[in-house]
Amino acid sequence: MAAQALALLREVARLEAPLEELRALQSVIQAVPLNELREQAAELRLGPLFSLLNENHREQTTLCVSILERLLQAVEPVHVARNLKVDLQRGLNHPDDSVKILTLSQIGRIVENSDAVTEILNNADLLKQIVYCIGGENLSVAKAAIKSLSRISLTQAGLEALFESNLLDDLKNVMKTNDIVRYRVYELIVEISSVSSESLNYCTTSGLVTQLLRELTGEDVLVRATCIEMVTSLAYTHHGRQYLAQEGVIDQISNIIVGADSDPFSSFYLPGFVKFFGNLAVMDSPQQICERYPVFVEKVFEMIESQDPTMIGVAVDTIGILGSNVEGKQVLQKTGTRFERLLMRMGHQAKNASTELKIRCLEAVSSLLYLPPEQQTDDLLRMTESWFSSLSRDSLDLFRGISNQPFPELHCAALKVFTAIANQPWAQKLMFNSPGFVEYLVDRSVEHDKASKDAKYELVKALANSKTIAEIFGNPNYLRLRTYLSEGPYYVKPVATTAVEGAD
């Protein structure tokens, strides 16, 4: 089969209009195992196929791209980098985006290979073309270019090539294309900055990080909304957070939230700014962030009382993030009756909001109520029990009602709430004393899809593995849970059949 493919490849090289041969080659090449192609890699002559891409013939281009995608998988990245340089450069200039994507996928392979990447770093013209691909209309082409440049920048040589040469001017020129392309370059800069302090230093020296931060705190509300997402990505790293704090950016974001009340357009950027602080709190110290920036907590409480589903959703997500660890839970607990009212509001939304907002509320509730066994002090258990009862007049009944709705996503989200509290003795007592709840737990006929069966299994596992479950549920029920656990999430009880004498 591989020999047949090589013969067809040679035939293609000799013909001026080889459509029939290309169709035959495409058919054969897909059937040849990749390991066989690799064995013949030294004999693959790909130049003629690349040459055929230069002709303005749509079907021919499509066939060549398909064939090259397959054949190039069999060729080592070093070989591609050294022997197909001219073809790669032509590919990046090709008017057909499928050819650019093919070329960038090969450049992606090259930059992942420590031996081959040097060939790219030493080719200034090729690097320049990759940069200008960021400015193309096709998003897939732009993303592939960003990915390759980001990967190149993981090495010292790559950082120098990008930031200490004319390439930086090319990057700044391509930013002038339009707003969308400028944000793509910012995305690349943030990706590179996030790798290490040294990478961030190269990016700040270039002036591009400063430019991003200037736009973040500028007057254009739509630009703010876009830039805050990128700055949030930078804040996921410790060195990124340090830089933002030193530059006074976190204080500036806090001040913008303070002034949001008098800005009629604040709804465009406020959700992103609040999310920024939510992530900051959970990555650093919830207590320190909330004490230093009280406007953040105040704004979250305001937003959950809003009539705007977007604002409520962001507030709910932020509360879930903030309350995902014990320190964050304690910060929320200190707000006293105000937090109890917030929980009541979340319970109301979980019952009455749109399906999407219900799910977000349920996920936040799961995050708030979960306590790892090693953190289950008497005080914290009393706190989660109190929070659970604040959600509704009968919170267990509320979540059982939601779990019975015929929507798998809602069903799973409600089961996740039960799973979050399943290892806490007060919750086990509630479940045991709720009529029919134990039967519901071991009833496999309720769940029909894989996600629901998995969610039910996680709930049963959390209960069965708890140290207090046998005492609270009683041994017979405990054994039913262990049986369910050992049978796995997808067990189907065999249906007994009776043979009838004389039946066919």
Image (cartoon, grey):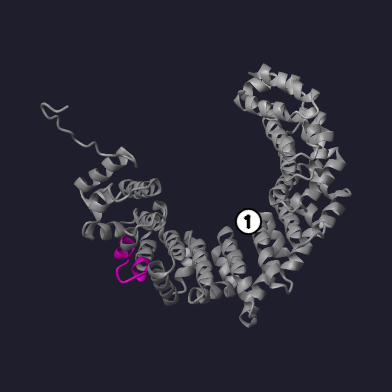
Q: Residue at x 39, y 52 (%)?
A: 373
Question: In the picture shown, does residue 279 fall above or below 500?
Answer: below
Q: Nearer the viewer, residue 464 or 72?
A: 72
Give the quarter of the figure containing the C terminus.
Answer: top left
* Residue at the right extreme of this rendering: 166
Question: In the picture shown, does residue 487 fall above or below 256?
Answer: above
* Image location of residue 408, percent across then percent down: 39, 54
User: In this image, 175 relative to 342: left or right?
Assistant: right
* Image location of residue 440, percent across then percent down: 26, 53
Q: Nearer the viewer, residue 308 or 436?
A: 308
Q: Residue at x 81, y 37 (%)?
A: 54
Q: Can the viewer see residue 113 in this picture?
A: yes
| Residues drawn in magenta | 387-400
* Image location of residue 416, percent across then percent down: 39, 55
Quarter of image, res 344: bottom left
* Residue at the left extreme of this rendering: 501
User: In this image, 449 relative to 279: left or right?
Assistant: left
Q: Which residue is mark 1?
A: 236
User: In this image, 122 relative to 241: left or right?
Assistant: right
Name the chief secondary structure element in magenta.
helix
Q: Can the viewer see residue 112 in this picture?
A: no
Q: Residues within 10 Å of mark 1 (few under 14, many from 20)?
A: some
Question: In the picture shown, does residue 39 fall above or below 138?
Answer: above
* Residue at the bottom extreme of this rendering: 262
Q: Amino acid at mark 1?
A: Tyr
Give the quarter of the figure containing the N terminus.
Answer: top right
Q: Nearer the viewer, residue 504 or 226?
A: 504
* Image location of residue 300, percent across then percent down: 53, 72
Question: In the picture shown, does residue 8 fall above or below 345?
Answer: above
Residue 424 belongs to magenta span:
no
